[in-house]
Image (cartoon, rainbow, N blue to C red):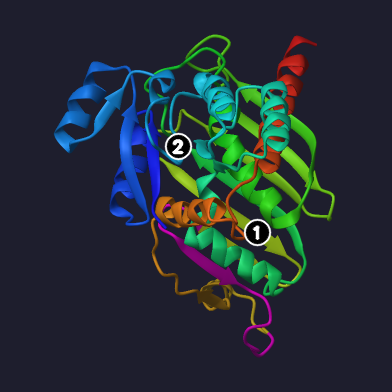
Amino acid sequence: MIFRALMVGLGKMGRNHLRVLREDPRFEVVALVDPSPQAAVEAKALGLKVLPSLDEAGGMEWDCAVVATPTVTHYEMASKLLDIGRPFLIEKPLCQTPEQCREILERAGKAGVAVGVGHLERFNPAVRKLKELLDANWIGRPIHFSFTRVGGYPETLPKGNNVLLDLAVHDLDVLRHMVGDLRLLSCVSHSTWSAGVQDTAEIVVKAESGPSASLHVNWVTPTKIRTVRVTGTQGVCFVDYILQSCVLMGGNLLRRAPTTVFDFHSLMEEYKSTDRVEFGITKVEPLKAQLTEFYKLLSGQPSEICSLEDAAAAVTLADSALNLSVSSERK
Protein backbone atom coordinates (compact mmCIF):
# COMPACT_ATOMS: atom_id res chain seq x y z
CA MET A 1 0.00 0.00 0.00
CA ILE A 2 1.24 3.49 -0.84
CA PHE A 3 0.50 6.31 1.62
CA ARG A 4 0.02 9.83 0.30
CA ALA A 5 1.96 12.19 2.57
CA LEU A 6 2.11 15.88 3.38
CA MET A 7 5.54 17.20 4.30
CA VAL A 8 5.01 19.99 6.85
CA GLY A 9 8.03 22.26 7.25
CA LEU A 10 11.09 22.59 5.05
CA GLY A 11 13.85 23.54 7.45
CA LYS A 12 17.07 21.56 7.88
CA MET A 13 15.33 18.48 9.31
CA GLY A 14 12.36 18.88 6.99
CA ARG A 15 14.61 18.62 3.95
CA ASN A 16 15.99 15.32 5.25
CA HIS A 17 12.50 13.97 5.90
CA LEU A 18 11.40 15.05 2.43
CA ARG A 19 14.39 13.30 0.87
CA VAL A 20 13.74 9.93 2.56
CA LEU A 21 10.01 10.18 1.85
CA ARG A 22 10.66 10.74 -1.85
CA GLU A 23 13.16 7.85 -1.94
CA ASP A 24 10.71 5.41 -0.30
CA PRO A 25 8.31 3.74 -2.80
CA ARG A 26 5.81 3.14 0.02
CA PHE A 27 5.11 6.89 0.21
CA GLU A 28 4.04 9.54 -2.25
CA VAL A 29 4.61 13.16 -1.26
CA VAL A 30 1.57 15.05 -2.56
CA ALA A 31 2.31 18.51 -1.15
CA LEU A 32 4.68 20.59 0.93
CA VAL A 33 3.26 22.80 3.68
CA ASP A 34 5.46 25.81 4.41
CA PRO A 35 4.71 29.56 4.13
CA SER A 36 8.26 30.67 3.26
CA PRO A 37 9.12 31.93 -0.26
CA GLN A 38 12.18 29.65 -0.28
CA ALA A 39 9.97 26.61 0.29
CA ALA A 40 7.83 27.60 -2.68
CA VAL A 41 10.92 27.81 -4.89
CA GLU A 42 12.22 24.42 -3.74
CA ALA A 43 8.81 22.76 -4.06
CA LYS A 44 8.44 24.06 -7.61
CA ALA A 45 11.87 22.69 -8.51
CA LEU A 46 10.79 19.28 -7.23
CA GLY A 47 7.45 19.41 -8.97
CA LEU A 48 5.54 19.52 -5.68
CA LYS A 49 2.46 21.49 -4.80
CA VAL A 50 3.14 23.97 -1.97
CA LEU A 51 0.58 25.07 0.61
CA PRO A 52 1.03 28.04 2.98
CA SER A 53 -0.67 26.22 5.88
CA LEU A 54 -2.42 23.02 6.91
CA ASP A 55 -5.72 24.85 6.56
CA GLU A 56 -5.24 24.71 2.78
CA ALA A 57 -5.02 20.89 2.74
CA GLY A 58 -8.72 20.35 3.30
CA GLY A 59 -9.59 19.82 -0.35
CA MET A 60 -6.70 17.45 -1.07
CA GLU A 61 -6.47 13.67 -0.95
CA TRP A 62 -3.79 12.61 1.56
CA ASP A 63 -3.31 9.89 4.15
CA CYS A 64 -0.67 11.10 6.62
CA ALA A 65 1.72 13.93 7.45
CA VAL A 66 5.32 14.33 8.55
CA VAL A 67 5.87 17.43 10.68
CA ALA A 68 9.30 19.06 10.95
CA THR A 69 8.48 22.61 11.97
CA PRO A 70 10.11 24.58 14.84
CA THR A 71 9.36 23.18 18.30
CA VAL A 72 7.36 26.26 19.24
CA THR A 73 4.79 25.30 16.56
CA HIS A 74 4.48 21.59 17.43
CA TYR A 75 1.47 21.98 19.69
CA GLU A 76 -0.40 23.94 17.03
CA MET A 77 0.52 21.51 14.23
CA ALA A 78 -0.39 18.44 16.27
CA SER A 79 -3.69 20.03 17.34
CA LYS A 80 -4.68 20.81 13.75
CA LEU A 81 -3.83 17.31 12.53
CA LEU A 82 -5.82 15.77 15.38
CA ASP A 83 -8.77 17.99 14.41
CA ILE A 84 -8.44 16.75 10.83
CA GLY A 85 -8.13 13.17 12.12
CA ARG A 86 -5.13 12.04 10.06
CA PRO A 87 -2.11 10.11 11.42
CA PHE A 88 1.24 11.86 11.55
CA LEU A 89 4.90 11.67 12.50
CA ILE A 90 6.11 14.75 14.37
CA GLU A 91 9.71 15.68 15.13
CA LYS A 92 10.97 15.65 18.70
CA PRO A 93 10.39 17.16 21.15
CA LEU A 94 6.67 16.47 20.98
CA CYS A 95 5.80 19.90 22.43
CA GLN A 96 7.45 22.65 24.46
CA THR A 97 5.78 21.82 27.77
CA PRO A 98 4.60 18.71 29.66
CA GLU A 99 1.08 20.19 29.78
CA GLN A 100 0.92 20.49 25.98
CA CYS A 101 2.27 16.94 25.62
CA ARG A 102 -0.35 15.52 27.96
CA GLU A 103 -3.13 17.30 26.09
CA ILE A 104 -1.97 15.94 22.72
CA LEU A 105 -1.62 12.47 24.23
CA GLU A 106 -5.15 12.54 25.63
CA ARG A 107 -6.69 13.97 22.46
CA ALA A 108 -4.97 11.41 20.22
CA GLY A 109 -6.21 8.60 22.43
CA LYS A 110 -9.79 9.85 22.36
CA ALA A 111 -9.70 10.45 18.60
CA GLY A 112 -8.02 7.13 17.84
CA VAL A 113 -5.37 8.86 15.69
CA ALA A 114 -2.03 7.08 15.26
CA VAL A 115 0.92 9.36 16.06
CA GLY A 116 4.66 8.70 16.07
CA VAL A 117 7.33 11.03 17.43
CA GLY A 118 10.71 11.46 15.76
CA HIS A 119 13.07 10.33 18.50
CA LEU A 120 15.57 9.28 15.90
CA GLU A 121 18.39 7.90 18.05
CA ARG A 122 16.48 4.78 19.02
CA PHE A 123 16.87 3.81 15.33
CA ASN A 124 20.62 4.41 15.24
CA PRO A 125 22.09 0.95 14.48
CA ALA A 126 24.78 1.42 17.16
CA VAL A 127 22.09 2.12 19.77
CA ARG A 128 20.14 -0.90 18.59
CA LYS A 129 23.28 -3.03 18.91
CA LEU A 130 23.83 -1.73 22.43
CA LYS A 131 20.30 -2.71 23.39
CA GLU A 132 20.92 -6.20 22.00
CA LEU A 133 24.09 -6.53 24.12
CA LEU A 134 22.34 -5.33 27.25
CA ASP A 135 19.40 -7.68 26.70
CA ALA A 136 21.87 -10.56 26.23
CA ASN A 137 23.83 -9.63 29.40
CA TRP A 138 27.15 -9.19 27.61
CA ILE A 139 28.37 -6.73 30.25
CA GLY A 140 26.44 -8.30 33.10
CA ARG A 141 24.07 -6.11 35.05
CA PRO A 142 24.16 -2.45 33.89
CA ILE A 143 25.26 -0.11 36.68
CA HIS A 144 25.73 3.30 35.08
CA PHE A 145 25.18 5.09 31.74
CA SER A 146 27.22 8.17 30.84
CA PHE A 147 25.88 10.18 27.89
CA THR A 148 27.63 13.05 26.10
CA ARG A 149 25.76 15.09 23.49
CA VAL A 150 27.51 18.36 22.71
CA GLY A 151 28.06 20.84 19.89
CA GLY A 152 25.82 22.45 17.31
CA TYR A 153 24.56 25.81 18.59
CA PRO A 154 21.16 26.49 16.96
CA GLU A 155 21.09 29.00 14.11
CA THR A 156 18.01 30.56 15.71
CA LEU A 157 16.73 30.54 19.28
CA PRO A 158 12.91 30.55 19.36
CA LYS A 159 11.36 31.57 22.66
CA GLY A 160 11.35 28.74 25.18
CA ASN A 161 14.09 26.69 23.57
CA ASN A 162 16.99 25.42 25.68
CA VAL A 163 19.62 22.70 25.51
CA LEU A 164 17.63 20.29 27.67
CA LEU A 165 14.56 20.44 25.45
CA ASP A 166 16.67 20.38 22.29
CA LEU A 167 19.36 17.79 23.11
CA ALA A 168 18.75 16.02 26.43
CA VAL A 169 15.40 14.57 25.31
CA HIS A 170 17.29 12.39 22.80
CA ASP A 171 19.24 10.48 25.42
CA LEU A 172 16.46 10.51 27.99
CA ASP A 173 14.36 8.64 25.41
CA VAL A 174 17.19 6.24 24.56
CA LEU A 175 17.76 5.50 28.24
CA ARG A 176 14.05 4.97 29.00
CA HIS A 177 13.83 2.74 25.93
CA MET A 178 16.56 0.53 27.42
CA VAL A 179 15.96 0.53 31.17
CA GLY A 180 12.42 1.83 31.77
CA ASP A 181 11.09 4.66 33.91
CA LEU A 182 13.51 7.25 35.27
CA ARG A 183 13.66 9.40 38.40
CA LEU A 184 15.40 12.78 38.29
CA LEU A 185 18.07 13.24 40.98
CA SER A 186 19.83 16.47 40.06
CA CYS A 187 20.58 18.99 37.33
CA VAL A 188 23.05 21.84 36.94
CA SER A 189 22.78 24.17 33.95
CA HIS A 190 24.50 27.28 32.58
CA SER A 191 23.56 30.22 30.36
CA THR A 192 26.83 30.97 28.60
CA TRP A 193 26.00 33.06 25.54
CA SER A 194 22.43 34.27 25.88
CA ALA A 195 20.99 35.41 29.20
CA GLY A 196 18.26 33.11 30.46
CA VAL A 197 18.87 30.46 27.80
CA GLN A 198 20.41 27.30 29.21
CA ASP A 199 23.05 26.09 26.75
CA THR A 200 24.88 23.62 29.02
CA ALA A 201 23.49 21.08 31.47
CA GLU A 202 24.43 18.03 33.52
CA ILE A 203 21.58 15.75 34.52
CA VAL A 204 21.67 12.77 36.90
CA VAL A 205 18.84 10.24 36.88
CA LYS A 206 18.18 6.80 38.29
CA ALA A 207 16.12 4.07 36.67
CA GLU A 208 13.45 2.28 38.67
CA SER A 209 15.13 -0.93 37.46
CA GLY A 210 18.41 0.02 39.16
CA PRO A 211 21.01 1.71 36.90
CA SER A 212 21.94 5.36 37.30
CA ALA A 213 22.91 7.74 34.49
CA SER A 214 24.57 11.08 33.90
CA LEU A 215 23.77 13.13 30.81
CA HIS A 216 25.97 16.01 29.72
CA VAL A 217 24.57 18.25 26.97
CA ASN A 218 25.73 21.58 25.58
CA TRP A 219 25.55 23.76 22.49
CA VAL A 220 28.91 25.35 23.25
CA THR A 221 31.51 22.69 22.35
CA PRO A 222 32.87 23.58 18.87
CA THR A 223 32.58 20.02 17.56
CA LYS A 224 29.71 17.55 17.71
CA ILE A 225 30.13 14.57 20.06
CA ARG A 226 27.38 11.99 20.52
CA THR A 227 28.45 9.08 22.75
CA VAL A 228 27.36 6.82 25.58
CA ARG A 229 29.43 4.64 27.89
CA VAL A 230 27.67 1.85 29.78
CA THR A 231 29.35 0.26 32.80
CA GLY A 232 28.21 -3.17 33.84
CA THR A 233 29.23 -5.77 36.42
CA GLN A 234 31.31 -7.64 33.82
CA GLY A 235 32.47 -5.00 31.37
CA VAL A 236 31.99 -1.63 29.75
CA CYS A 237 30.51 -0.71 26.38
CA PHE A 238 31.30 2.40 24.32
CA VAL A 239 28.92 3.65 21.62
CA ASP A 240 29.52 6.49 19.16
CA TYR A 241 26.23 7.62 17.63
CA ILE A 242 27.89 9.51 14.77
CA LEU A 243 30.37 6.81 13.73
CA GLN A 244 27.74 4.12 14.48
CA SER A 245 30.29 2.04 16.42
CA CYS A 246 29.85 -0.22 19.44
CA VAL A 247 32.89 -1.49 21.37
CA LEU A 248 32.89 -3.82 24.37
CA MET A 249 35.84 -3.95 26.76
CA GLY A 250 36.54 -6.23 29.70
CA GLY A 251 34.24 -8.94 30.89
CA ASN A 252 35.04 -12.61 30.70
CA LEU A 253 35.61 -12.74 26.95
CA LEU A 254 39.12 -14.16 27.25
CA ARG A 255 41.09 -15.71 30.09
CA ARG A 256 44.57 -14.35 30.71
CA ALA A 257 47.30 -15.38 33.11
CA PRO A 258 47.32 -13.30 36.31
CA THR A 259 49.74 -10.36 36.35
CA THR A 260 52.80 -10.82 38.56
CA VAL A 261 54.97 -7.93 37.35
CA PHE A 262 53.90 -4.39 38.18
CA ASP A 263 56.46 -2.14 36.48
CA PHE A 264 55.31 0.67 34.18
CA HIS A 265 55.96 -1.27 30.93
CA SER A 266 54.00 -4.30 32.14
CA LEU A 267 51.10 -2.16 33.26
CA MET A 268 50.99 -0.46 29.83
CA GLU A 269 51.01 -3.83 28.06
CA GLU A 270 48.21 -5.11 30.26
CA TYR A 271 46.16 -1.99 29.52
CA LYS A 272 46.66 -2.38 25.75
CA SER A 273 45.74 -6.08 25.85
CA THR A 274 42.44 -5.56 27.68
CA ASP A 275 39.75 -7.75 26.18
CA ARG A 276 38.14 -5.75 23.39
CA VAL A 277 35.42 -6.61 20.90
CA GLU A 278 34.20 -4.21 18.21
CA PHE A 279 30.87 -5.38 16.89
CA GLY A 280 30.09 -5.30 13.21
CA ILE A 281 27.25 -2.89 12.50
CA THR A 282 25.44 -2.48 9.23
CA LYS A 283 25.36 1.25 8.64
CA VAL A 284 21.78 2.45 8.18
CA GLU A 285 20.42 5.99 8.01
CA PRO A 286 18.24 6.25 11.14
CA LEU A 287 15.65 8.39 9.31
CA LYS A 288 15.03 5.57 6.85
CA ALA A 289 14.71 3.01 9.64
CA GLN A 290 12.29 5.32 11.45
CA LEU A 291 10.21 5.78 8.29
CA THR A 292 9.84 2.01 8.03
CA GLU A 293 8.46 1.95 11.57
CA PHE A 294 6.09 4.81 10.70
CA TYR A 295 4.88 2.78 7.73
CA LYS A 296 4.20 -0.13 10.09
CA LEU A 297 2.25 2.19 12.39
CA LEU A 298 0.14 3.42 9.47
CA SER A 299 -0.42 -0.18 8.34
CA GLY A 300 -1.64 -1.31 11.75
CA GLN A 301 1.45 -3.46 12.37
CA PRO A 302 3.49 -3.57 15.61
CA SER A 303 5.90 -0.62 15.45
CA GLU A 304 8.95 0.47 17.42
CA ILE A 305 8.41 4.14 16.64
CA CYS A 306 8.47 6.43 19.68
CA SER A 307 5.00 6.68 21.17
CA LEU A 308 3.30 9.78 22.48
CA GLU A 309 3.65 8.38 25.99
CA ASP A 310 7.43 7.98 25.68
CA ALA A 311 7.84 11.37 23.99
CA ALA A 312 5.81 13.09 26.71
CA ALA A 313 7.90 11.39 29.40
CA ALA A 314 11.14 12.71 27.84
CA VAL A 315 9.80 16.28 27.73
CA THR A 316 8.55 16.01 31.32
CA LEU A 317 11.98 14.86 32.55
CA ALA A 318 13.77 17.62 30.62
CA ASP A 319 11.36 20.24 31.95
CA SER A 320 11.75 18.98 35.52
CA ALA A 321 15.54 19.08 35.16
CA LEU A 322 15.39 22.65 33.88
CA ASN A 323 13.11 23.78 36.73
CA LEU A 324 15.31 22.06 39.31
CA SER A 325 18.42 23.74 37.97
CA VAL A 326 16.85 27.20 37.77
CA SER A 327 15.38 26.95 41.28
CA SER A 328 18.78 25.86 42.65
CA GLU A 329 20.44 28.92 41.12
CA ARG A 330 17.98 31.23 42.89
CA LYS A 331 18.76 29.84 46.35
Q: Is residue 42 left or right of residue 260?
A: left
User: What amino acid does circle 1 point to?
Assistant: Val
Tell me where residue 225 appears, x and y as whole percent: 45, 44
Tell me where residue 101 appears, x and y as whole percent: 67, 28
The residue depicted at 14 percent of the width and 33 percent of the height is 45
Instruction: Report crowding for label 2: few under 14, some 14 to 19, many 20 or more residues within 10 A (C-alpha).
Output: many
Instruction: Report crowding for label 1: few under 14, some 14 to 19, many 20 or more residues within 10 A (C-alpha).
Output: many
Q: Quadrant of residue 160?
A: top right
Quadrant for the N terminus, please.
Answer: bottom left
SS at circle 2: strand
Quadrant for the C terminus, please.
Answer: top right
Asked if residue 248 lies in the magenta stretch, the reply is yes
Residue 309, can we see it?
yes
Identify residue for label 1: 230
Tell me where residue 99 appears, x and y as whole percent: 72, 22
Asked if residue 252 lies in the magenta stretch, the reply is yes
Identify residue for label 2: 65
Identify whether 161 is placed above or below 248. Answer: above
304 and 46: which one is in front? Answer: 46
User: What amino acid does circle 2 point to?
Assistant: Ala
Magenta stretch, residue numbers: 240-258
The residue depicted at 76 percent of the width and 41 percent of the height is 205
SS at circle 1: strand
62 and 88: which one is in front? Answer: 62
164 and 22: which one is in front? Answer: 22
Identify whether 6 is placed above or below 41. Answer: below
The residue depicted at 79 percent of the width and 47 percent of the height is 181
Q: Main secondary structure of the magenta part?
A: loop
Q: Residue furthest left?
A: 45
